[in-house]
Amino acid sequence: MHHLLLFNIIDQIRALGWGGAFTLLRNGIVLGSLYSLIALGYTMVYGILKLLNFAHGDVFMIGTFMGYGVLIAFGGALAPTIPFIPLILLMFAVSMAGSGVVGVGIERFAYRPLRNAPRIAPLISALGVAFFLENSAQLLTNSAHELYNGYALGGKNGNFGPLLNPVFTIDQVPVTVIMVIVVLTAIALMAALVLIVYRTKLGKAMRATSFDREAASMMGIDTDRVISMTFFIGSVLAGAAGVMYGLYIGDAYFFIGFLFGLKAFTAAVVGGIGSLPGAMLGGVLIGVVEAFATGYAGGQWSEIVVFGILILFLLVRPTGLLGSPAIQKV
Amino acid sequence: MTDVDGEQDAGNGAAPEPLLRLDAVDTFYGPIHILQGLNLEVGAGELVCLLGGNASGKSTTLKTVLGIVRPRNGSVSFEGEDITSRSTSYRIGKGMAIVPENRRLFGPMTVLENLEMGAYLHGGGAKEDFDRVYTLFPLLHERRKQLAGTMSGGEQQMVAMGRALMAKPKLLLMDEPSMGLAPILVERSFEIIKQVHESGVAMLVVEQNANVSLSIADRGYVLSTGRLVLEGPAAELREHEDLRKAYLGR
Ligand SMILES: Nc1ncnc2c1ncn2[C@@H]1O[C@H](COP(=O)(O)OP(=O)(O)OP(=O)(O)O)[C@@H](O)[C@H]1O
Ligand SMILES: [Mg+2]
């Protein structure tokens, strides 16, 4: 028997084998897709306002509750009153739109009044909003873990539904419908985001405003509106991540925004805060690192490793993997 | 020509409403009083230059015209409409555009995208607007895919001019268009200013280079620490003792 962590890890790697490694990789990519979606919101807001929007993780948390609310309104996963595909689509629609509105509201009331204040002021305001949202959710939900029971969606008489069916298997490791949904939805949303940012008038106005807000307003761009839209889009992505978190991981809980949000923030920093491809890459990287740390070293290590990486990047490479070197340290 | 010290000669009877009018404008940055009782007009199709030393308030004047900063007292009107409390985008929609100090291009965006931003309130630019700008600056068409931040200073100046012209302005504001350009490019850029002016666009041009700008302007104003100290037809200003001493170096 060894007591050294390193030996334990090596034993674990041997014991789990290739199948185990693939399982961890699979879990990491699915989890990482959610981190990527949330990281995009952090990075977009940072890009346009140079603000770390600490409340963003809690917008994601509210998204999980909105999805849950729709699910319950239609009978819950065990006895849904409408077919499960429209139900899931409705959960996405409501959570995405609702989170978007919450994000816009946060910007309007907590950040916009501080637009010309020193940079520390909106940062403190962001922390305040985060606590406000967490504590409100705690009060409103009585600190309950609201279970999605996503496994039962579409199943008959409370049996397993199709979400846990394998789509394909690699080395006897199944990749299920919900995993495919998470990854494909994340990819589709990111593709849509890239199209918006690089191809539409709004997206170009967002880039112009990020680069030089005053010059953008000199072109007639209503920069307040552009900033609102940035919060809206980032929060819509967080809302989508919220529903998928509920369906895949299982529950809505007032405190998930903190830890999950912090990991997504780590992803944004690792990718290079302000960079869209960076947030996407960073999310998947953090997801995979976390999954391997959990699988090989044990769950108690996952946070230590992830936040160790955050500290390492902040110290050694604050611009992240894909960030521009000119970026300011916060 | 008038030496401005308080009294303003009233318009001769039924003078037409100028395109732009600043009336007794006081602009502050926080507690600092910058523009002090500024009166200034630009007629339709007129080319007016605004001269003055460093920190005299020239850029602040343009920002006040655009609504980037708001005057504490006084009014700004455009085509006879009081726009003092209107947003910048409203003013640009009404027919203003600016070539800002230091150009302020969107560096990580392409030349084409920069031009599109100039026409932001006009649907991102109709083909004829692009054609007009590309005729004036054929290089911009050639380089439309290049990132604006990677262009040379002279080329960036063309992008900044082209971007402003995309808005089809009635009034074009220019803040030191010749700054940082080699003499030959200064001449070239003033030729273009003249050309644009002759196409009917009114202009308010801020310049340190008084000689060249007065040679193409209709009228001029001279600012000193936020107050007008001289105004009049360009030809007369060129001959004015004080101005010659202070700015023309002869
Ligand atoms: N945003 C600002 N906040 C505080 N003071 C400002 C601001 N912008 C300009 N000023 C001050 O206002 C005064 C006038 O500045 P302005 O930029 O209008 O001068 P200018 O005539 O354009 O000078 P230059 O020829 O050097 O460009 C200066 O003393 C400047 O320091
Ligand atoms: Mg200036």
Image: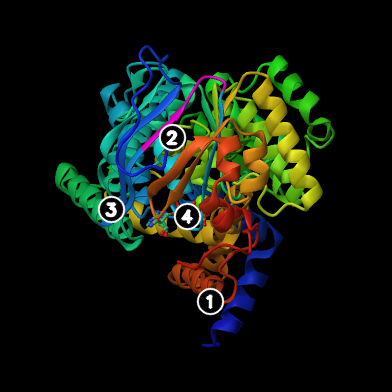
Identify the magenta region: B39-45
Q: How far across and how far down the image is residue B158, in percent?
A: 72, 39
The quadrant of the image that shows the C terminus of chain A is bottom left
- The reply to whether the residue tagged 2 has its Cβ within 8 angstroms of ligand 1 is no
| Amino acid on which disc 3 is placed | Ala
Q: Which numbered marker is on residue A264?
A: 4
Q: Earlier in the sequence, mark 3 or mark 1?
A: 3
Q: Nearer the viewer, residue A91 or A77?
A: A91
Q: Which residue is mark 3?
A: A130
Closer to us: mark 2 or mark 1?
A: 2
| Amino acid on which disc 2 is placed | Leu
Mark 3 crowd level (few <14, some 14–19, many ≥20, 10 Å Cα): many
Q: How far across and how far down the image is residue B170, in percent?
A: 54, 21
Asked whether the beta carbons under mark 3 and mark 2 sit within 8 Å of each other, the answer is no
Mark 4 crowd level (few <14, some 14–19, many ≥20, 10 Å Cα): many
Q: CA distance from mark 4 to mark 2?
A: 40 Å
Mark 1 crowd level (few <14, some 14–19, many ≥20, 10 Å Cα): few
| Amino acid on which disc 4 is placed | Ala
Q: Which residue is mark 2?
A: B66
Kindly identify the residue that appears in the image at 59 percent across and 40 percent down. Answer: A183
Closer to us: mark 1 or mark 4?
A: 1
Whether labels 1 and 4 belong to a single chain: the reply is yes
Q: CA distance from mark 1 to mark 4?
A: 18 Å
Q: Relative to A177, say whether A286 is above or below.
A: below
Q: CA distance from mark 2 to mark 1?
A: 43 Å
Closer to us: mark 4 or mark 3?
A: 3
Q: Which residue is mark 1?
A: A315
Q: How far across and how far down the image is residue B166, in percent?
A: 64, 25
